[in-house]
Amino acid sequence: MSLIKHCLFITLTFYCIISYGQQEGVIDNEMLSLRLLERINQAKSDSDRGKYHNALENLDEALSIALKIEDQSNLGKIYTKISKIQFLVGEKDKADVSIKKAMQIQRDIDDYGNLAIAYNIKGVMHSTQNEYEDALEYFNSAKGLFEQENLEEYTSDVLLNEAKIYIQQNRLEEAKFNLEKTIILAKKYNQLNRLSAALIYSAKVYLALGNTKIALSQVEEGLEIAQDNNIIQDKNEAYLTLSDIHEKNEDYKNSHLYIKKHIHLSDSILNVTRENLDIEASGESINNYKEAQNAQLKAQIDEVSAESAFIRITTILSIALITILSLLTLSLYKNNNIRLNTNTMLHKKNDELILAKEKAELASKTKANFLSTVTHELRTPLYAVTGLTNMLLDEDPKPHQLSHLKSLKFSGDYLLTFINDILQINKIEANKVEVDPEHFNLRNKLENVISALSNSANNQDTKIHFEYENGIPETFIGDQLKISQILINLLGNAIKFTKDGDIWVRTYKIDKKDNIYYLRFEIEDNGIGITKEKQNHMFESFSQGSVQINRKYGGTGLGLSIVKGLIQILKGKIYLKSELGKGTTFFFEIPLEYDKNVDKTEVVEVIKANKMESLDLSNVKILIVEDNKINQMITKKILNKMNLNCDVVDNGEDAVEIVKTTNYDIVLMDIHMPGISGLEATKMIRAFDKKITIFALTAVTLEDKMHEFGDAGFDDIISKPFKQDDFEDKLHAALTGEKIVSSFFS
């Protein structure tokens, strides 16, 4: 009976201890978190001093704590740090395992900033093994994530790593571009170690390009920073580069001097590294630690042996109880291991999917950047073509020149339409198109579209018939611009393929739920029709009925693809019915909201007037900042024709200086210029003038980058080539003090 009482006493005591432990759990976790940060900081200190084995010991302890308190965020960071050090000490396989663990954790918890850091390190691993293409893929992914997370300061390291690869591949212009960006970012964020390295590697590039003067200037600047901040590796690289530069200049004395410095410092670095990688010394310290632990354990056993019989029985029962719990824990641990192994297998199976997803995202981003670059390069000369053509047409050309100028204008307009179509397709595919609902009169909208295209129909000897079902309201809430674009495309197609015929435009209700009307629009023609084989592909990009049709009727083959995308954005559907030689009917259905509180008479079309004529422009001063001479002339002539006075400078530095001394009302700032860019020039102007209106007059089209214009301090963007009405509206708003509502920055 006495033994049972003792057992009950021990059990109650054990559960009291557990209860007390639960109350103390929060405090314990806080203490462990502090210990975790302490170990990580100590590991960084050890790593910075080259004590890599000490750093690994501290990181291993930090890893155990992170696992214990289930701190996933720090767990991913620790694996990244462990991987980096393992790679430095030559344990490449272990480093690869660690970095993969880090990336998996960071993907699971959406820690994209630290995932980008891991990608950068993984890229360096591939780079050192001459696996350059794999390395560049990881660097690209890292840059994309840093950009996504607004972590611009971290991209300098990635750009520097990319530049080193480009130098190895003799892609010197790309390396030069990356290093220039690295230098700008390193200065901006006071990253002295990256600044010194970027300057030294930039010197290597200029040396390879044959410009020893700039190479010498940059390496000396990089060396000075490295010496002031004791950046040993950069000092060593600078000595080697200086030796190469002096050798190129046939200054063999200085070349020999710097190569001796390089060899001496390399030997010192090697000796320090050997000392820090002394594995036997590390093994000895571990053995000493184990012996101390064994001595402590033996002392505890001796102390237990000296206790009384009751304590011994209590201890035995406690051990028995703990053993049972330990067995249960072991069972749970094994089950957990099985689950983890299963998850690991699933993760392995998903690795390919994840990699494929990342590659697809990278491909999409690359495509967007490619389109932005190509369209920018096309828009810039197109601005000159359309601008000069319009100017010549306005200057009373000779009769025999008129037809040529009109042909040139048509070609320019066609090319601009083609570029805009490509961009719109890209925006639709990237889900960058947003719905902009407003009150509008649907019947008036349809009649206006028909009226706008009636001349084209008359030229084809074709009649357009309009039917609007009785009982359908006329005023709705919807995105009238997208609806107009859909109708113009479909009706324009019908006119293009119908000669001496008829076209019917019909609108009627197919359903109604509450205040939502489901409307069907039909555009029917009795033109040439479409074959059954071609109908299945009509909504694909660059699709036409046939090569012969494309040559005869023209067009980009993008219109119907855009139409389908816009209709899907409006939550609608589109159908096609056609028979070769008998005509074609396009049906599309979209939901539109009816607001019974808005009378149809309240929604009226706004007729635009020439607002600029009402202003006194005699004292208005405008500055054009543009490096292209032809574009300077065109923009100046357009402004002079509007009776506006303007000055012209061809670079950002001059723009900043002239704005300091002259009072301008508006600055039209180009973006891509030699020296500092339009973005940087605008930031500088905003440092001393917050009120002046600055428009970005640019051919840049990638909307993902538009936030950069807002951040730099631009009031709005005027895209080249611009529409005269839009240009005048924005100038009028700026000159009258109206609020400029930018569609780019919203």
Image (cartoon, rainbow, N blue to C red):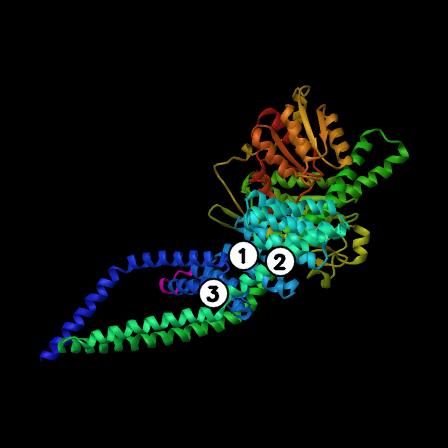
Q: CA distance from mark 2 to mark 1?
A: 37 Å
Kindly indicate whether the residue at mark 1 contacts the one at mark 3 (C-beta within 8 angstroms): no
Q: Which residue is mark 2?
A: 264
Q: Which residue is mark 1?
A: 116
Question: Which sits in the foreground, 731 or 274?
Answer: 274
Instruction: Please tell me whether residue 70 belongs to the stretch shown in magenta.
Output: yes
Q: Which region of the structure is painted magenta?
A: 67-72
* Horizontal arrangement in the rendering, residue 162 relative to residue 337 (left or right): right
Question: Which sits in the foreground, 366 or 718?
Answer: 366
Secondary structure at numbered mark 2 = helix
Which amino acid type is shown beneath numbered disc 1? Ala
* Horizontal arrangement in the rendering, residue 283 relative to residue 174 (left or right): left
Q: CA distance from mark 3 to mark 1?
A: 26 Å
Q: Nearer the viewer, mark 3 or mark 1?
A: 3
Q: Dot 1 surroundings within 10 Å: few (below 14), some, or many (20 or more)?
A: many
x%, y% of residue 437?
A: 54, 42
Kindly indicate the quadrant of the structure image that contains residue 271: bottom right
